[in-house]
């Protein structure tokens, strides 16, 4: 994916896996200097409050690490659960599928590049 | 309790035609005959009931109406109740089918046993007990049939009011009609979100022209739906806000959290098309 990271969650996340993912992802972002992270959760059909918070946390962390984060493929049941739990995803954009997510990342990356060259 | 052999069976058999005639005239008096049911139909129904009754009484006496020989009679009464309920008869009119049977039967009992008061009293009691039980069974079935109709209508109403329609590529609309309670909002939310995922539509327009009032609870339900839609990566426009509703929203201090609102579905569609990058132009004549 070039300068972006793609995370695809394909198995049912249990608590241990979610914590490891958090670790791995933040390390990865730092190492590769990624400016964008695409998290694909289209395989997740259900979430409980723990996983819900995990997703929110992972998104927030990558945002803090200055990587634009886009969450794609959220299923209706997951969206409803997150709303019921009152969880928001601060600083995280969402898109319906991977294609749109990529477009979002590319667009915001171009903005950043322009900014940087403008200031120079 | 029956003491000695029931003479009911003998009476029913002996006077079948008279009983039928007497019953029909009672029913006619009691307004059982109106446009909803023809005389021929009623005559056929009474005849069938008499025949079934005779068979049941012959085989098992009249002590226990729950026993197997009485099944055909009970089922017949159930089907009569169901059809009466569907045709819009009241429960009294339906029960009258059974209760008006008493008079002709008692008259014939008096004719046969008039000289024997003990037997007359006994048989009168037997018949009364029997017909009361059958009458109650009829009413019970009638109630059940009515409840089934109501339940079915409720389900249909729920389904009627939550269709999700596609207005254009990537634009879905949800015209809401009627009051929004928690149950309906749940159904609505789920079907709308499902369609968004299925069609990959980025804009959903919720039109509330048909919603008469909005209170804080309704507004909360709507906002939950909007939040969920945004969470998934699509956006939402609420249209059809009538002046009264706009006033209510401001008075109640409801915060719409930056949701775009439009007065009409047309305006909402125009905005959605613009956001999607479509341009609408008239062809030159």
Image: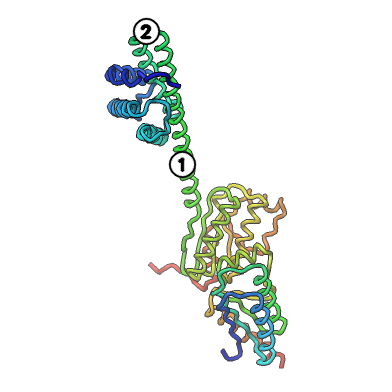
Marked residue chain, label 2: B
Q: Residue furthest bottom?
A: A120
Mark 1 on the same chain as mark 2: yes
Q: On the image, numbered disc 1 is attached to which residue?
A: B148
Q: Give SS at disc 1.
A: helix
Q: Nearer the viewer, residue B83 or B37?
A: B83
Is residue A18 in view from this perspective? yes
Number of marks in the rendered image: 2
The residue under the point 42% across, 10% down is B118
Q: Nearer the viewer, residue A101 or A62?
A: A62
Tell me the tag on residue B177: none
Q: Quadrant of residue B90?
A: top left
Place of residue B74 in the rendered image (x, y in percent of width and height, measured from the top left): 39, 33
Place of residue B176 in the rendered image (x, y in percent of width and height, measured from the top left): 53, 53
Tell me the tag on residue B114: 2
Locate residue A118 relative to residue B120 in the image: left or right. right
Place of residue B268 in the rendered image (x, y in percent of width and height, measured from the top left): 55, 62
The residue under the point 44% across, 17% down is B125
Q: Give SS at disc 2.
A: loop
Query: Which circle's residue, 1 or 2, is located before the other in the chain?
Result: 2
Place of residue B24 in the rendered image (x, y in percent of width and height, measured from the top left): 32, 20
Locate residue B180 relative to residue B64 in the image: left or right. right
Q: Residues within 10 Å of mark 1 (few under 14, many from 20)?
A: few
Marked residue chain, label 1: B
Q: Quadrant of the C terminus of chain B?
A: bottom left
Task: Name above or below for residue B75 compared with residue B159.
Answer: above
Task: Name above or below for residue A91 compared with residue B9.
Answer: below
Residues under labels 1 and 2: Cα distance?
Answer: 46 Å
Q: Nearer the viewer, residue A100 or B241?
A: A100
């Amino acid at each position: 994916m070039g300068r972006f990271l793609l995370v695809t969650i394909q198995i049912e996340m249990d608590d241990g896996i979610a914590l490891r993912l958090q670790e791995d992802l933040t390390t990865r972002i730092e190492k590769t200097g990624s400016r964008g992270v695409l998290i694909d959760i289209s395989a997740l059909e259900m979430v409980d409050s723990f996983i819900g918070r995990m997703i929110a946390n992972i998104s927030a962390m990558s945002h803090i690490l200055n990587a634009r984060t886009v969450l794609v493929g959220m299923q209706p049941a997951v969206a409803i659960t997150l709303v019921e739990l009152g969880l928001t995803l601060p600083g995280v954009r969402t898109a319906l599928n991977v294609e749109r997510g990529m477009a979002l990342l590319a667009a915001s990356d171009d903005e950043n590049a322009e900014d940087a060259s403008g200031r120079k | 309790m029956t003491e000695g052999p029931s003479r009911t069976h003998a009476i029913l058999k002996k006077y079948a035609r008279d009983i039928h005639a007497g019953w029909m005239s009672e029913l006619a008096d009691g307004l059982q005959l109106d446009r909803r049911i023809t005389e021929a139909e009623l005559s056929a129904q009474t005849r069938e009931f008499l025949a079934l009754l005779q068979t049941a009484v012959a085989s098992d006496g009249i002590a226990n109406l729950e026993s197997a020989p009485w099944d055909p009679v009970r089922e017949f009464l159930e089907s009569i109740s169901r059809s009466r309920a569907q045709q819009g008869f009241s429960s009294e009119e339906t029960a009258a089918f059974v209760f008006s049977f008493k008079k002709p039967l008692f008259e014939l009992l008096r004719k046969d046993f008039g000289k024997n008061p003990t037997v007359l009293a006994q048989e009168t009691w037997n018949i009364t007990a029997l017909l009361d039980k059958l009458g109650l069974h009829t009413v019970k079935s009638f109630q059940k049939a009515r409840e089934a109709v109501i339940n079915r209508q409720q389900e249909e109403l729920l389904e009627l009011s939550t269709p999700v329609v596609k207005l254009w590529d990537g634009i879905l609309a949800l015209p809401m009609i009627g009051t929004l309670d928690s149950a309906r909002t749940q159904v609505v939310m789920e079907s709308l979100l499902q369609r968004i995922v299925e069609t990959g539509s980025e804009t959903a327009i919720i039109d509330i022209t048909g919603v008469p009032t909005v209170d804080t609870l309704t507004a909360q339900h709507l906002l939950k739906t909007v939040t969920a839609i945004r969470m998934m990566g699509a956006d939402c426009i609420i249209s059809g806000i009538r002046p009264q509703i706009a006033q209510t929203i401001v008075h109640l201090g409801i915060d719409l959290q930056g949701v775009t609102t439009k007065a009409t579905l047309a305006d909402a569609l125009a905005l959605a098309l613009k956001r999607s990058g479509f341009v609408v132009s008239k062809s030159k004549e």
